[in-house]
Amino acid sequence: MLDVLGYPSVDALVDAAVPAQIRSTDGLRLPAARSEEQVLDALRALADRNQTRVQMIGLGYHDTITPAVLRRNMLESPAWYTAYTPYQPEISQGRLEALLTFQTVIEDLTALPVAGASLLDEATAVMEAVLLMRRANKSSKSNRVVLDADCLPQTLAVVQGRAEAVGIEVVVADLSQALPDGDAFGVVFQSPGASGAVRNHAPLIAAAADRGMLTTVAADLLSLTLITAPGEQGADIAVGSAQRFGVPLFFGGPHAGYMSVRSGLERMLPGRLVGVSVDVDGKPAYRLALQTREQHIRRDKATSNICTAQALLANVAAMYAAYHGPEGLRAIATRVHAHAVALAESLRFAGREIVHDQFFDTVTVRIPGGAHDIVAAADRAGINLRLVDADHVGISCDERTTDDIVRRVLDVFGAVPVTSGDIVALPAEVLRTSDYLTHPVFHRHRSETAMLRFLRELSDKDLALDRTMIPLGSCTMKLNAAAEMEPISWPGFAGIHPYAPATQTAGYRELIGNLEDWLAEITGYDRVSLQPNAGSQGELAGLLAINAYHRSRGDVERDVCLIPQSAHGTNAASAVLAGMRVVVVKTAPNGNIDVDDLQAKLSDHDGRVAAIMLTYPSTHGVYETEVRTVCDLVHSAGGQVYVDGANLNALVGLAKPGEFGGDVSHLNLHKTFCIPHGGGGPGVGPVAVRAHLAPFLPGDPMNAEGPAPVSAANYGSAGILPITWAYLALMGPDGLTAATKTAVLAANYLAASLADRYPVLYTGESGLVAHECILDLREITKRTGVTAEDVAKRLIDYGFHAPTLSFPVNGTLMVEPTESEDLAELDRFIAAMVGIHDEISRVDSGEWALEQSPLRQAPHTAEQVTDAEWTLPYSRQYAAYPVASLRRAKYWPPVRRIDGVHGDRNLACSCPAPEAFQTEPTLQEAFA
Ligand SMILES: *Cc1c(COP(=O)(O)O)cnc(C)c1O
């Protein structure tokens, strides 16, 4: 590889590529590398220091049983967890079908017609609903939203903090009787309430509608199998968490948040939405719908900043519903309810006061002055109850609650079980009578054999890292090592409730403390918060910290966020959500920030500049030499420097953003630090800051005193932090630095090997790229009509996932090989790109008409190349096997090229009827 590049050593190459101005001199002070055995032993010791309990705290987190067939073949299966967000729908049909199943679960249970493919957690989903209500309620002039006082406390904390940033006034009101006086654009109800109380919200929903307000119900998904759905009660929006559908507690996350809306609101829905469209043959095919609402296209006008969401967890929840079916879910809910009823009855019999007569799974007991003692006694009995306040204890039942657990809880109260008949403690007017989950997908996979094969059938349709490199620029699709993944399902990590007392979570706290320290050392910052559960949330947390810092100094006028033209779409969307105005800074002809334009913008907005958000290395894959100058200019104008750290795979061990001018950065643990992408989430987006911003990092959602949180759980997606801990412990300082150098070597090797055929758009002063390179197809497109998309789709026939398409520059492909791909795989990719270039030449020379070329016809399905008819000017063999190695291992896409526009015009976002897939007659039938 070095010979191709003409450098004598990797160090010489790296010295030439990375500007001396940013190079870190002091290395990484991190523990030395350990073996996989040692790291797993250390993690086992940490897991052992977390104490598992029977978890009955509730508050939106309920213990659940992950069916082993799902845990082993989905949650722990690389075919599912190493996949990328399904932007290339032809190689993503399996996980798109699974996400569509998730949407159908949500649509059915909430009785609202359109659901998205997951949000980050329940509390942020409520905030998204608040923003949606404000956007959608054009007739209301009000800036107020009313929140049910019985909302989950973490929901109140997240919404209050984020609403303040965008100037929304939050009124928290007791909604058990009436709406508060005054205008509001929307109301949020919680069902059941945090207290456990179940109420019929229909009258107040109707009253709110009469007063011109939109309504949202934050609903527990399992309860909806027994309780009238939000849609049936008249709500416009339903939100919540799908955690208790088979996803472990994970000390707070990752879990899928959900949102569904009535028709008319679907084009404003935040986050990803899977829809049904057709391929060129008119066969039904899935793809992401209505992407024009999203941050990567709409930037500061997007419906939200969400990019990475919780795809893997949504898929687990979908399959949990498919495995149990409607009858199974109803049976689980009925059992959960019966246990709660038994607890309430027996406690009442023992003379205890139960606060609400009507509840689903949670009872609140009044124990004047005795709550602390009861919670402590329960702890000694191995049970976590919720300490509501000095006088009240909450007890939540879940799928794991047994008669024996009920007996042990009663014992803590000095009560004994009394048996009652089939008593239901739900208001008669909310008992659900409508059907749900009637689609065959919820009936056909109810045995383990059937489910196992269904999961295999779906994942076989997809390309993930277990089959091929995924050279997506900006996404860093590197190895997710098996040893890093193993610990996440250990009960010592998976079984911990996010609000368990600190005494029970010593292992997690040590792991988190280590990670915070290590990431601070790697980035050159002073403090790190692991709370944000995606890169986009890290951006928001960082910008909110910048806001709070300016305000703390009386600098209240600063509201401008400078963002380079080439920035990732989340940057602009996050700035808006932080209440800032976006001002775009131009790109110079060499791809770098245009320093003259920056200076002009700084003086145009003198005294108003809050921050600049720059990505380093830039989204053009280049180490810009003048980054220090840019930082100095912004600092001297009184602004803060936000360095988007998504490209840290080009920096670890070589340079530290906190040293070359950054005040704050987010990192993507699901890129640089080995958390798998899960087909579009989970993610972790820690925010790292210099000391002056540390007081403004996100606070604990359970502590009303501190700064506002950005997620429902204090440590966000804590359950997957062991992956990054393991990675850093395995690599050590030398390994991490070597990985960065290898990533730079691989990117430059690809760039140099392909540059003759596909010009590399931007390079640094040395003519080298950083960890990725942009291949410019625009000249080819102009000459031949062959587009970057054609190349991306033809790569599928060659067995590859496409590089990043048309970001950050339209008509280009951005390639990031990472350090994880060996020379053989890099050469296989080069061979594919060379082969494709030959095909382009044959279009160029007129040998093939573009429409009849393998490029435009790509991808080719098995059905197409075995069809009786074949009229294309190249052979069937060439269509399927353009290089010989494919004869050994061939990936067949299940559909041909998908028509996205058709699906957007005819929006369908739930599982289609099976008849839609009725295929052509078989040969036998045809000749019969
Ligand atoms: C991936 C990425 C983000 C957003 O991260 P998510 O985790 O998807 O929210 C932001 N900036 C850049 C440059 C990225 O590549």
Image (tube, rainbow, N blue to C red):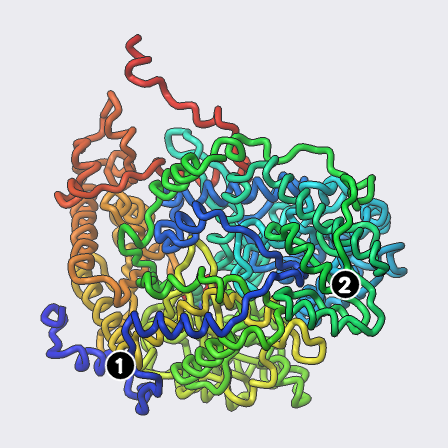
Decide if residue 148 is on the left or right side of residue 466: right
Q: Is residue 802 visible?
A: yes
Decide if residue 31 is on the left or right side of residue 430: left
Closer to the N terminus: mark 2 or mark 1?
A: 2
Tell me which residue sits at (33%, 13%) in the image: 925
Query: Residue beneath label 2, please?
Result: 414
Q: Is residue 569 visible?
A: no
Decide if residue 235 is on the left or right side of residue 87: right
Q: Quadrant of residue 61?
A: bottom right
Relative to residue 458, is residue 378 depicted above or below?
Answer: below
Q: Quadrant of residue 615?
A: bottom left
In the rendered structure, which amino acid carries the disc numbered 2? Gly
Relative to residue 470, is residue 267 depicted above or below?
Answer: above
Residue at the top extreme, as displayed: 928
Q: Residues within 10 Å of mark 2 (few under 14, many from 20)?
A: few
Decide if residue 771 is on the left or right side of residue 320: left
Relative to residue 626, is residue 126 depicted above or below?
Answer: above
Tell me the number on the disc at residue 734. 1
